[in-house]
Amino acid sequence: MMGRGTTAVTDRRRVLLTAVGVTIGLHLALLSAQAFAAVLTGSVAIAANALHMGVDTAVHLVALGGVWLATRPADPRHPYGYERYEALASLLIGMLLLVAMGVIVSSALPRLADPKPGAATGVGLAIMAVSAVSTGGLALYLRRKARQTQSRVLGSEAIHAAADALISVGVLGAVGVAAAGFPRLDPIMALGVAGVVAWRGWLVARRAADVLTDAAAVDTDAIRTAALAVPGVRDCHAVRSRGEAGHVRVDLHVHVAPELTIIEAHEIARGVESAIRRLDFGIAEVLVHLGAAAPRSQVERS
């Protein structure tokens, strides 16, 4: 019979894989449409956006593999689970985005030095308008799924999709203005796309690095306050946390009265664990180390 924990992992995996699959399908469609629009208009900005969309498609395939690995249940080889594969996938995503930025810049600079007028065909502009609306809707969908699953990868993808929608709006305006007699605006917009791509790559890579290097995941003061509020806890220290949203692991040292029995002390430890989990920090595991506090008479004499 499947336990609740296993069922939750399976449900989360299904939601994550479905969300990434939807994203890949939409990006493939938009990639084809924007490549066609780039040919029609001769716009380097649309071409840059199409390249960006192509890299995003590769990024989503990496994310799909990361999610598939990250949602596997723990086993003897990986007793803490596979959650860090999701952070590793995010790190690869950041690196791919930085590479895409370099390609876009190298394509836009020659056109900036020698601008060429483009043709703002109705079909090309309509494709960019549809791209803006589609990616905006995708951002809302991914944000909802990221909150549901507390997934760092889907959270990153929601930010990406929102930025894609804004970029598409900017490219749409730039192509129209460039065709009206300001051709240099087209490569300038392409460089703007490169800047957004670079910023996104850095942001995603930095967040992933925090997880992989065990940066503090939650507010340790809030953890300590919650623990000290539990009846029977005399002191709390050495609070540590690591992981990502939905998979945060916390450990801390709690002191209780030395005259308590083992059963009484462990009841207090369970109370501490429950209090910390109620903080809604996406905590998956709490490890409480019990210790005996100094007798009150000794504390008073000191």
Image: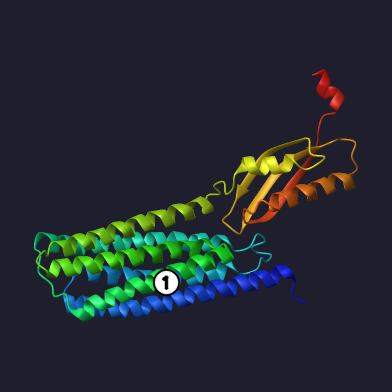
In this rendering, would 285 be left or right of 105? right
Q: Residue at point 18% right, 69% down?
A: 176
Q: Quadrant of residue 201?
A: bottom left
In percent of width and height, residue 234 lies at: 78, 35
Q: Which quarter of the figure is the C terminus placed in?
A: top right
Q: Residue visible at 69% across and 72% down?
A: 7
Query: How many circles with numbers are drawn on the protein?
Result: 1
Q: Quadrant of the N terminus?
A: bottom right
Measured as percent of width and height from the top left, residue 186 is found at 17, 65
Q: In the displayed orientation, state which residue is furthest to the top.
A: 301
Looking at numbered disc 1 in the image, what kind of residue is underneath it? Answer: Gly
Residue 54 visible in image: no
- Image height of 73 relative to 234, above or below: below
Q: Is residue 208 visible?
A: yes
In percent of the image, x 33 and y 60: which residue is there? 197
* Residue 195 drawn at (x, y percent): 29, 56
Q: Which residue matches tag 1? A: 137
Task: Establish if 253 lies above or below 34.
Answer: above
| Location of residue 77 by image quarter | bottom right
Report helix, strand or loop for mark 1: helix
Q: Is residue 269 left or right of residue 40?
A: right
Residue at x 13%, y 62% (from the top left corner) = 184
Q: Residues within 10 Å of mark 1 (few under 14, many from 20)?
A: some
- How is the model colour-coded? rainbow
Across and down, in percent, residue 282 comes to 62, 56
